[in-house]
Image (cartoon, rainbow, N blue to C red):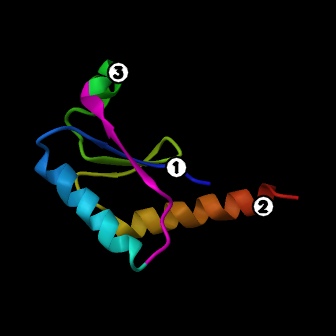
Amino acid sequence: MPTLELLSRDGCGLCEEMARALEALRFRFPLPPVVVVDIDTDPALQRRFILEIPVLRLDGHVVCHGHLDEARLRGALGATRAAREAGSP
């Protein structure tokens, strides 16, 4: 199953907006569970993403940042699904 991560931090209004947008999208489109990761708990993530949060990653690859790009997310999920189906026996 694909993994969606929302890279966030406390007090980030844009992060809260993206989380709400993902929840709203879930009613219209099947999404894997979203794991919220506080970048302040990981110095490497903080250095890499401090100026880009919120960041949405699918299986470790950045899908979008700043705001939810629904088209890119749908495309990435479709490509992931197709790749997994092609690799299954």
| Residue 70 lies in quadrant | bottom left
Q: Amino acid at mark 2?
A: Ala
Q: Amino acid at mark 1?
A: Thr
Q: Residue at x 79, y 55 (%)?
A: 87
Q: Amino acid at mark 3?
A: Ala
As helix, strand or loop, the secondary structure at mark 3 comes to helix
Query: Which residue does the numbered mark 3 point to in the structure image?
Result: 44
Q: Residue at x 64, y 63 (%)?
A: 81
Query: Which residue does the numbered mark 1 point to in the structure image?
Result: 3
Query: Which residue does the numbered mark 2 point to in the structure image?
Result: 86
Whole-percent x and y of residue 50?
22, 32
Q: Earlier in the sequence, mark 3 or mark 1?
A: 1
Q: Earlier in the sequence, mark 2 or mark 3?
A: 3
User: Which contiguous range is marked in magenta?
Assistant: 29-40
Q: Is residue 81 left or right of residue 12?
A: right
Q: Earlier in the sequence, mark 1 or mark 2?
A: 1
